[in-house]
Amino acid sequence: MPATGESLELIREVLPMSILIVDDEQTIRDTCAEVAEQCGMKATGVSTAEEALEILEHSAVDIVLTDLKLPQTNGVQLLKQVHDQHPQVTVVVLTQYGTIESALEVTRMGAFDYVTKPFRIEELRSRLERVARAVELQQENRLLREQLRTRPGFGGLIGVSMKMQRVYKMIEKVGQHEYPVLILGESGTGKELVAKSIHFSGPRKDRPFAPVDCSALVPTLIESELFGYVKGAFTGAMQAKQGLLEAAKGGTLFLDEIGDMPVDLQAKLLRALQEREVKPVGSTERRQINVRIIAATNRDLDSAIRAGTFRQDLYFRLNVVQVKLPPLRDRKSDIPILVTAFLEKFSESHGSVRTISDDAMRRLIAYDWPGNVRELENAIERAVALGSGPIVHVGDLPSNLQYSASERVPEKDEILPLEELERRAILRTLRETGGDKLSAPRMLGIGKTTLYRKLKQYHVEHAEA
Ligand SMILES: Nc1ncnc2c1ncn2[C@@H]1O[C@H](COP(=O)(O)OP(=O)(O)OP(=O)(O)O)[C@@H](O)[C@H]1O
Ligand SMILES: [Mg+2]
């Protein structure tokens, strides 16, 4: 298993430290970007605080270098928002000479350091290098601390990224209460695991956790599963059966894939939840229920509501607290620890724990995991089963990963078909930007739609990168 420092190094190699430069003057942005790139960083420049916040929302940024005077929202307000919403981001302030009296003043604003304009290139470089070192240390410490803190607990959830830390905090908080929780996230992001963690960390933990898959069964079956039926309610109902709403008494009912529940059943479910009563199929008798509801879906419920396939009133009922699970590609720093845990898990039957080569780990970090943690878990299971010897190598990984991170380097002056050159340029840019939807097409000088079309054309599987 790579030690913490090493895994951070591997992540850095695939995903360089990223800096967001916010200044309304193009020349300043360009100069800063050039210097940052010389320091080995990936630089993005924007001219307003609004654009900066938008990028911070969607991509991993380590450092923000911002001017204090900006056209709309000014730099001080931006600083405050970054501090509140993205506390892991380190901010460096750019100011006109004379605006800042002392370093203490910027620290008080929540910034790490400042650079006064006009600056000399050398000075900026040494400042950025200093910040980069501090950020690296911080991240390493955080990783260590959080690895220690988060290994156990939370029903088997693994992950040390800030994004997962937020999820853990939410689980801790909502676990203690009774209100409904709606868990959103792409397939394989751990929705069921989170639902269990909420249940098992709260006061209902000694009562049942009852999952119902609202997508797998035919509608009449979901209905009898949820509400139960009396003997003779329909052909084949030889005996009365208690529905899960009633049977999970005192516990939690997990409505998985709630977005797939047929609309008429949604109405019935809503009534049961509002009245805290169920009427089993074929019965006139109402029975009291006492369950906590946790629902999950990978669908976009807002558009389902607009399309009329999901009832808004049920949505309001379920969406008291929302837990959004980040896709794995947005928390790549969790990949090493997940890989290590899965290696341990699947190596058990082989007697000794396998480790993984640095090169293989690099591919795993570079890949975008459209199937999220489930896909990663399957990849490791397969690698352990197929591989021999104590180390998992690149050759043991699924074939789409084997060719993802490093292509055969062309011989010097080797002539390649244009199409191949283009394909390589696209793959390389995606890797270097960590699949960033904004900067990859920008770096390639093409539009987003063109990029998507080309990904399709070249059969790049993680087209949503
Ligand atoms: N943070 C995590 N730590 C460890 N294992 C995880 C994590 N997230 C997901 N997994 C594992 O990945 C697999 C998928 O998780 P889960 O079934 O909870 O996902 P899901 O979001 O419900 O997916 P789907 O929408 O496809 O049902 C499970 O084997 C689970 O144990
Ligand atoms: Mg699920």
Image (cartoon, helix red, strand yellow):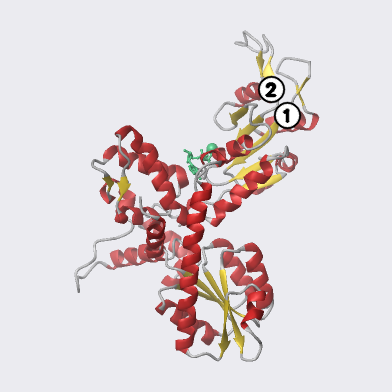
Can residue 447 be seen at all in this image of the molecule? Answer: no
Q: Determine crowd level at label 2: few under 14, some 14-19, many 20+ residues with C-alpha closer than 10 A.
A: many
Q: Is residue 399 above or below residue 25?
A: above
Which quadrant of the view contains residue 243?
Answer: top right
Secondary-structure class at tag 2? helix
Q: Position of residue 47 (x, y in %)?
A: 59, 78
User: Going by the picture, which residue comes out furthest to the right?
Assistant: 275
At label 1, which amino acid type do we have?
Answer: Lys
Residue in the foreground of this view, choosing between 216 and 367: 367
Q: Position of residue 157 (x, y in %)?
A: 52, 43
Residue in the foreground of this view, choosing between 176 and 57: 176
Image quarter where the C terminus lies is: bottom left
Of mark 2 and mark 1, the one earlier in the sequence is 2
Q: Is residue 238 left or right of residue 400?
A: right
Q: Position of residue 13 (x, y in %)?
A: 37, 64
Q: Is residue 270 left or right of residue 223?
A: right
Which quadrant of the view contains residue 109?
Answer: bottom right
Q: Is residue 214 left or right of residue 189?
A: right
Residue at the spot 48% in from the left edge and 57% down from the top edge? 143
Can residue 349 be seen at all in this image of the molecule? Answer: yes
Q: Is residue 227 above or below residue 141?
A: above
Residue for badge 2: 227
Q: Which mark is residue 311?
A: none
**For the residues marked 2 and 1, what is the alpha-carbon distance in whole angstroms?**
9 Å
Q: Is residue 390 above or below residue 111?
A: above
Residue at the spot 75% in from the left edge and 28% down from the top edge? 272
Residue for badge 1: 268
Residue at the spot 63% in from the left edge and 49% down from the top edge? 169
Q: Position of residue 256 (x, y in %)?
A: 59, 35
Q: Are marks 2 and 1 in contact (CB under 8 Å)?
A: yes
